[in-house]
Structures are given as C-alpha cells and as structure tokens.
Image (spheres, helix red, strand yellow):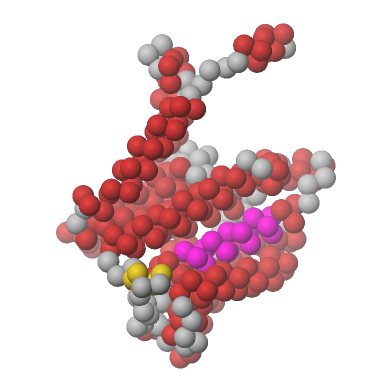
Amino acid sequence: MSKLTKIVALCVLAALLLSLPSFLNPYVTQIVITTITYAMLGLTFAMGLKVGLLRFDVAAWWAVGAYGTALLITKAGWSFWPAALVAGIIAVALGYLVCMLSIPRGMMVFFLVGMVLTMVFYQVFGSLKFFGSWGGISGIPRVTIGSFEFAHKPELYYMGLALLVVILVVYYLLYNSKIGTAWNAIGSSLKLANSVGVDVVKYRTANILIGNFFLALVGAYYISYSGVAAPQTFSFNNSVFVMMYVIVGGINHSLIGPLLGSLIITFIPEYLRAAQEYEPIIRSVFIILIIIFLPNGILGLFDKYINPWFQRSKYCAPFRARVPAESRATEINV
C-alpha cells in the first residue's frame, strides 16, 4: 500500500473514531469503552509473546494500577493524573522484583510465578479491609482536567481512545527499533539470540516492565469509568480471556490482532445476554473453533487469501507501494 493511501486510510479511520459517540447510544458506547480496555490489555499480552513469555499476570498489574490509583485518590487525596502515574511506577518497581526472581529461570518459571501472583493479588485485595475487602474501593471521584470533568460516556470514550493511541504508537516505535529487533531474535530462537550477544534477561525484563507500566495505566482508566476497584474484576480468568483476544484476532499481528480479537469477544457475549446461562459455553465453543480451524486467528485469513490476491490483482496496483527501480535492479542482480 502506497504512503498516500495509508495517510488517507488513517485520516478516514480517525474521523470515524472521533465521530463514533455521536452515532451510538450510551449502552453501546459503554461496550466500546470496555472493548478499548480489553484491547489495551491484549496489546501488552501480545508484546510479551515477542520475547516468548506468556503473560498470565496481566490481571495482577491491571489490579495494581486500579487499586494504587484508587487508594491515592480516596485515602491520600491525590488527583487522578499523578495517582495514575505513581501507580504505574509502583507496578514497574514490583514487577522488577518479580522479573529478577523469575525471568533468569526461564519461561515456565515466569509463567507459573505470574499465575500464582495473580491469584495472590486477588486474595489480598479481597481479604484485607485496607483494600475494601470483597466490596472493593468505591466512591472514586470523576477525572478532571482543570474545570473539565469526564462525567459522561463520550468523554470517557475519548480518554480511552487517547490512551489506546499512545500505547499503539509506543509499541509500534518499540517494534521498529533496535529493541524490537532484539525482541524478535529472542522470540525466534533463544540460542540464536544468545549466540549473537543479545542479553535475553535484560531485554525480556524491559519488555515486561514497559508492559507493567501500561497495564497499570489501563487499571487507572478502568476505575475512571467504573468508579470502583473490586477484586472480582482482576481474577485469573480475566488474564486467560486477555490471551483469547490475541489468539482470536491473530497471534502473528501484535498490534491489529488484539484490537480485532477484543472487538469480537466483547461484542458477541453482549448480544447473547438473552441466553446468559449459555453465554460461557457459546464463547468457549467459538474460541475452540477458532483455535482448531484458524490457528493464526481471524487475520490469518487475510494473510492467506486477501493479501496474496491484493498483491496479484491488477485492480489493486495503484494502492500497492511502488518499489524503486534501483531496488528492483538489486533484486535481479542478486
């Protein structure tokens, strides 16, 4: 796709996203806000896969962000923005301790520590009165910027959209940097990465800590629209669901895959509320069918059928990126 076509497509997409709340009722807008939240969680899970790590600790750091922000606001009297930033730093600091204990011991140890950590955090937040016990921390005030208050669904939607764009830009820049090259080497082959001098522990730790910071920000965003930090939201099951968003969307697409997967898995259950008792069964069957018949996710169909057709079709030639003549000559000589 040519540069001009990409710019036009991005402008159209931006206009659509910015105008979306005007076309939706409050109920559907809330579903979209939830989708944005899950998409951001999925993006961080997908980033962990870049270095070969399964992040079943997503809900744990999501909870740290939510509870840290809620406590600083309700007990210390902080405003939302510095509280969210400090909660992110706390998630990085605690995550560093966990990484130092688990990452040098390999993927399986990291996976098990993350799983246990999520369960421990769930019990701690639910059992201790300091964290509101099982009722959680409620009465969290609205987010403000000066005199402007994020009091309605459209404002909260734009707040989440802005955070989503920031995460997408940061992750895109990381993936296309030297850090991203090292991550890809680690994800492809640990032995090969070690043989060319890549410090696996250092790059894996950086990957996890960057993810922790943004997971905490997502937790802060979550309490901004829910108004409560309750342990039930941050159970281990939600870490598993985050993995499903990535698998359904397309595990080979670290940026687009989680967005598509969260959209599908969030909207389908919402429209199955009439048969709520069957919803978990239907969702599970759907995910199993995706894993069996579309192991590369929905976007795997694009890679297998649509993209090859796009490259061959003469009608799509104006939209394809033009290869400079000198590059073609180099390819021929090679």
Classify residue 300 as left or right of residue 327. left
Classify residue 156 as left or right of residue 204. left
Q: Taking 307 as reference, is 178 above or below it?
A: below
The residue depicted at 40 percent of the width and 54 percent of the height is 161
Frontmost residue, 215 versus 53: 215
Q: Position of residue 196 (x, y in %)?
A: 81, 41
The residue depicted at 44 percent of the width and 40 percent of the height is 297
Q: Position of residue 125 (x, y in %)?
A: 48, 81
Q: Taking 306 as reference, is 25 above or below it?
A: below
Magenta-colored span = 204-218
Q: Position of residue 66 (x, y in %)?
A: 46, 73
The main secondary structure of the magenta stretch is helix
The residue depicted at 60 percent of the width and 74 percent of the height is 90
Q: Tell me if residue 206 is in the magenta stretch.
A: yes
Task: Kindly tell me whether residue 7 is visible in this rendering.
Answer: yes
Q: Residue furthest left?
A: 274
Frontmost residue, 60 versus 68: 68
Where residue 324 sits, quadrant-wise, is top right
Q: Tell me if residue 147 is in the magenta stretch.
A: no
Task: Kindly tell me whether residue 294 is visible in this rendering.
Answer: no
Q: Taking 3 as reference, is 26 above or below it?
A: below
Q: Position of residue 183 (x, y in %)?
A: 67, 46
Q: Residue furthest bottom?
A: 129
